[in-house]
Amino acid sequence: MPAVSYLLDPVGRRTVTAAAEPIDAIAIRELGVEPVRVPLRARALRDAWTSATDVPLGAAWVRRDEKGEVHALSSVCPHLGCAVAFSKPSGDFRCPCHDSSFAVTGDYRHGPAERGLDPLPLEVKDGRVFITWVRYRVGGSSREPA
Ligand code: FES
């Protein structure tokens, strides 16, 4: 039995695959009503077999609304996972892959995506915005972490 345990180690151990802690993303003074794209990188990631530092996780579109409230949206299109971009002329998000579009709030507007852009948890502390990266399942109308 100890030999089997040895061979299977570290199967069954808690595996960390994403940044568990909020990431220091941007200073709040850098934000306006127009969203800015903020890359999110984990300082350190570790799974059962490897560890790495400064790992790119994804990106968030971050903005302050007219009331000063901060919002962060995943840049991953909820249709099939392409990266959405903000269009200044139209004031909305567009996906280049299959032409879905989303309001600046992330609400669904048009195209094959079945839900709006996915919000990311955030907190504001000492003038900085800390965002927790969540990779949501793509496809479908329900919002679930992958
Ligand atoms: S991946 Fe965005 S519309 Fe298909």
Image: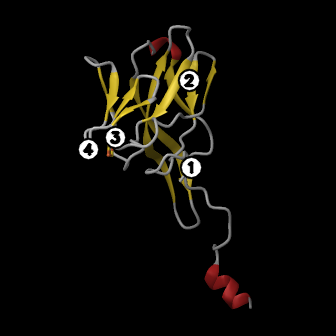
Question: Crowding at label 3, few (<14), some or many (≥20) Cα neighbours within 10 Å?
Answer: some
Q: Which mark is residue 129?
A: 2
Quarter residue 57 falls in = top left
Disc 3 secondary structure class: loop
**C-alpha separation, residue under disc 3 versus residue under disc 4:** 9 Å
Quadrant (top left/top right/bottom left/bottom right) for the N terminus: bottom right
**C-alpha separation, residue under disc 1 versus residue under disc 3:** 17 Å
Disc 4 secondary structure class: loop
Q: Earlier in the sequence, mark 2 or mark 1?
A: 2
User: Residue 54: x, y in percent?
Assistant: 46, 44
Q: Which of marks 1 and 3 is nearer the N terminus?
A: 3
Q: Is mark 4 within 8 Å of ligand 1?
A: yes
User: Residue 50: x, y in percent?
Assistant: 52, 63
The residue labelled by disc 4 is 97
The residue labelled by disc 3 is 83
Q: Do the residues labelled 2 and 1 touch (CB within 8 Å)?
A: no
Q: Is mark 1 within 8 Å of ligand 1?
A: no
Disc 1 secondary structure class: loop
In the image, residue 109 above or below residue 12: above
Query: Residue at image x 45%, y 29%?
Result: 106
Tell me the mark number nearer the camera, choosing from 2 and 4.
Answer: 4
Of residues 75 and 50, which is closer to you in this image? 75
Question: Crowding at label 4, few (<14), some or many (≥20) Cα neighbours within 10 Å?
Answer: few
Of residues 82 and 102, which is closer to you in this image? 102
